[in-house]
Amino acid sequence: MAVPILYNVRSLRQRPVSTLATALGMALVVAVFIAVMALASGFSAALARTGSRDNAIVLRQGADSELASGLDRDAAQIISAMPFVARGADGRPLVSPEVYVIINLDRPGGGTANVVARGVSAQAFEVRKGVRVVEGRTFRSGAPEILIGRSIASRFGSTAVGDKLRFANRDWTVVGHFEAGGSSFESEIWGENEQFMPAFRGEVFQSVTFRMQDPAALKGLEQTLEKDPRLRVDVEREYDFYANQSTLLTQILEFFAVFVTSIMAVGAVAGAVNTMYAAVANRAPEIAVLRTLGFRPAAIVGSFLLESVAIALAGGIIGCLLALPINGITTSTTNWSSFSEVAFPFRVTPDLLAAGLAFALLMGLVGGFFPALRAARMPIVQALRQA
Amino acid sequence: MALVEVRGLTKTYQRDAQVIPVLENLDLDIEKGEFMALMGPSGSGKSTLLNLLAGLDHPTSGSIRVEGQEVSGMSSRQLATWRSRHVGFIFQRYNLLPVLTAFQNVELPLLLTSLSKKERRDHVHTSLNVVGLADRVDHYPRQLSGGQEQRVGIARAIVSDPTLILADEPTGDLDAVAGDEILTLLERLNSEFGKTIVMVTHDPRAADRSHRIMHLEKGVLTR
């Protein structure tokens, strides 16, 4: 039979300062853990949302990013004419041969950052279903006009509708802002590919993205394109292409979350061990009385573990509450695959909160184990003498 | 057959290389319904004997049988169960859990039984009635006088109706009046409820209230 929980709860209240200090130590660990994991989760979600499972992206053979790729007009034409490319209501293929360059923009607070400028075809908005102009209008064909992604609109100067932004030795008029479902496209500047091409790298596209007529038939069209002697290309599902870009940084962030919080956890667990050893020492006579009455060592272990876990749980909940307000706050990092800035919101998901609580419980169990064991193993007669 | 039979009981403690004998080859019978006092100077082994009778410690050699059951050979686990059924222990310093009310303190031993919540409540109220604290059920130990605390301690010791009540200097921390009340209560438990009581005491007046006084001198029983 277990020692009544009431005994633990009230005993905790007898020493509010050490209980609270221990709980806060754990709360901090949990909050940092959730925050870093939310960063990784937000970044990974932004890139995963970027690609569509219905689209395929074509790059030059061996190129692992758009930056390293190059496809000439003929290649773009050949791909557009393929039968597996879906067609729009007007009968034109849903293809966007794209120019992809990194430009340097000034931050309002000083310093500069790399931003992706993407030259797209008129069909790009149909190929990418989630892209929508939310302010102003889209660029006109043949005009030096650009659209600014919603995430970066507020982060750089000269990005308001009507402003002129200077890059590639030209002035570009900002005619609108667009959103793209929280994806990394929202961290890009879009203009017409035919305008960007001469301004940047000359007669070359970096990628061709098209809507597949049958998304399940990727394997077949991959083979057709990769074996076509006129082309030397690699094909990938657009979703996978962007998701893979996030893998490395996400893994590093997750490693960082586990590594840093593990070190912090050692400190927090040491605090818990200390608190619980003190509790066991102070309550030695009480433990001895419980044992005299016939409570078994296992019940004593359970009782003190429960106490430690209760402290940890309180810490975990406080930690979750501390971390919760960062949900949705936009931050930015460099996408290591494109060396450009990606803005995205922290994502504090229910899973992350659960993981944070589980982490706290683990700390409580580890921190309470040895003190609980000491409590149970205490010789009754000696402990009674301390009364 | 006596309720408690102690035969050849020896207890030694080891301090570094030195072996310190506490009890030596001790024989003792305690009859059912007896109220016995154990006296002797400090360090004579009174409390050690009481702890061995309570199953709180293991003897170095010898045997203790209670109701014909051999106690000295039990494991710690078996002893825990045995104590919960057969022993009511009264401490010198009452040893109530400070965070629990009088009711909750007295209820503790019953949590180890299969009694229902209602049965437990009835038992606790009966015990607190016997010790005259029916009106103090929701008081915490710090809200009670020393004498009242000890009466809660006694209620806790009798609530599970144990075979044996062991009291270690039950009046040691009390003034004369409160001490007298406790002794009267123990006498009543013995005469009215037939409880078998072994009481360790320094106080000859306390010992006089018992039926039989045993003296321990350097680990050996004398009458």
Image (spheres, rainbow, N blue to C red):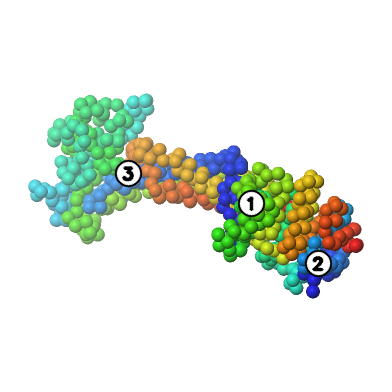
Would you say the residues marked 2 and 3 are in contact, meaning their CB atoms lie under 8 Å apart?
Answer: no
SS for dot 2:
strand
Q: Residue at x 78, y 53 (%)?
A: B183
In this rendering, would B197 be left or right of B204? left
Marks 1/2: CA–CA distance? 32 Å
Marks 1/3: CA–CA distance? 68 Å
SS for dot 1:
helix
Residue B167 falls in which quadrant of the image?
bottom right
Q: Nearer the viewer, mark 1 or mark 3?
A: 1
Query: Is any part of residue A373 visible from this angle?
Result: no
Query: Is any part of residue A327 visible from this angle?
Result: yes
| Relative depth, front residue between B201 and A144 | B201
Q: Nearer the viewer, mark 1 or mark 2?
A: 1
Marks 2/3: CA–CA distance? 82 Å
Q: Which mark is residue B134?
A: 1
SS for dot 3:
helix
Residue marked by disc 2:
B30
Q: Relative to A302, does residue A274 appear above or below in the rendering?
A: above
Residue marked by disc 3:
A46
